[in-house]
């Protein structure tokens, strides 16, 4: 453990935007259990991994508050100080620029970049892509081309499981006293993710349509894994506005491909999605990128929300 850690009362933790994600970690944050393995995660999908793998040995806090759009996160001075006191930091480089900068500057010994634990791809999803990046097959990639790659890997259960295995190994190395438990917890999580993958594969195998419309391009890996086509109103950035030409293109495509539904999200405005749906006479529904859990989420954790996503896709695509 990091001997420099200090007590952080619950009220202070909340004011820093470091609210814990489960009852277990909430208790740890409240009591300042310095005998725990303290992990600071960048946002919910990373925090969920840390909690599942760390179990009772880890005290996990997230830099992104529940309900906060993670792409927009700015790191406060207090949060930078909190980072320096942690035993490990877990993040996904390329998703949150402010986090990338803060983690690069921190002196934490164990920094785990989830983007290095699986292969990120360029899905050609708009403003973040760089010309000539498609076709890269190597696992390693430079900082320059990172920004052209789709960071939403957690929405593919297979890739999320790859990341989980890498996180588990990093925890084992950083906190060897509890390595056996981290290994066991990682194996259990990977088994559950394989089950989720099986549910999606079977549930989306036979559908009337293979095309779905989303608010922003978060579902490229999921679409690729299960033989679907994602058409995003916006690019990777959920706040970007589509052009009039893009909206007209989507209206025409909806008719051609039998699209019934425009999906929107819980953490960003649904205005554009609903306008497109109204103009094209389509339904709307939620497809959650699981970037954070709130009272609007269709479930209490990653697995519940992903199962809700599967049901929404089955309905929209006409699963048989």
Image (spheres, rainbow, N blue to C red):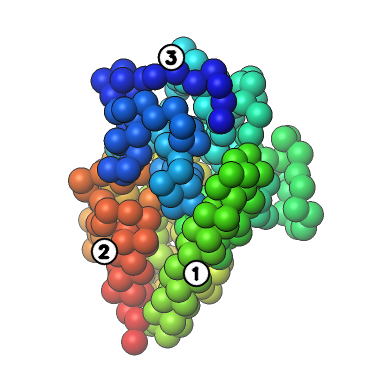
Q: What is the spatial separation of the Cα atoms under label 1 and label 2, in whole angstroms? A: 37 Å
The image quadrant where one finds the N terminus is top right
Identify the residue position indicated by label 2 in the image.
282
* Label 1 Cα neighbours within 10 Å, binned few <14 / some 14-19 / many ≥20: few
Whether residue 32 is situated above or below residue 59 in the rendered picture: above
Q: Residue at x 66, y 29 (%)?
A: 109
Kindly indicate the quadrant of the structure image that contains residue 73. Answer: top left
Q: Residue at x 38, y 51 (%)?
A: 290
- As drawn, the label of residue 78 is 3
Identify the residue position indicated by label 1 in the image.
191
User: Which residue is more in the foreground, 127 or 276?
Assistant: 127
Position of residue 243 in the picture relative to residue 183 (left or right): left
Which element carries disc 2, helix, strand or loop? loop
Q: Position of residue 123 (x, y in %)?
A: 60, 55
Q: Earlier in the sequence, mark 3 or mark 2?
A: 3
Whether residue 174 is situated above or below residue 30 in the rendered picture: below
């Amino acid at each position: 453990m990091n001997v420099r850690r200090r007590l952080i009362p619950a009220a202070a933790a909340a004011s820093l935007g470091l609210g814990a994600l489960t009852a277990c970690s909430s208790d740890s944050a409240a009591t300042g259990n310095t005998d725990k393995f303290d992990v600071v995660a960048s946002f919910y999908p990373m925090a969920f991994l840390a909690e599942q793998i760390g179990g009772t040995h880890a005290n996990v806090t997230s830099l992104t508050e529940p309900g906060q759009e993670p792409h927009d996160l700015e790191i406060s001075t207090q949060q930078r100080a909190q980072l320096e006191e942690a035993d490990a930091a877990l993040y996904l480089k390329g998703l949150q620029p402010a986090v990338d900068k803060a983690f690069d500057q921190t002196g934490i010994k164990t920094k785990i970049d989830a983007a290095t634990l699986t292969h990120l791809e360029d899905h050609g999803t708009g403003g973040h892509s760089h010309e000539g990046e498609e076709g890269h097959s190597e696992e390693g990639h430079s900082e320059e081309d990172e920004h052209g790659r789709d960071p939403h890997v957690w929405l593919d259960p297979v890739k999320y499981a790859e990341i989980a295995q890498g996180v588990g190994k990093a925890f084992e190395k950083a906190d060897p006293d509890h390595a056996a438990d981290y290994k066991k917890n990682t194996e259990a999580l990977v088994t559950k993710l394989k089950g989720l993958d099986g549910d999606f594969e079977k549930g989306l195998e036979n559908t009337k349509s293979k095309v779905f419309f989303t608010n922003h391009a978060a579902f490229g890996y999921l679409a690729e894994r299960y033989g679907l086509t994602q058409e995003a109103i916006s690019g990777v950035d959920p706040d970007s506005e589509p052009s009039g030409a893009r909206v007209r293109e989507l209206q025409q495509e909806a008719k051609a491909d039998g699209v019934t539904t425009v999906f929107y999200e819980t953490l960003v405005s649904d205005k554009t999605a609903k306008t497109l749906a109204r103009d094209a006479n389509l339904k709307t529904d939620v497809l959650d990128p699981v970037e954070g859990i709130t009272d609007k989420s269709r479930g209490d954790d990653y697995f519940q929300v992903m199962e809700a996503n599967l049901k929404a896709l089955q309905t929209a695509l006409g699963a048989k």
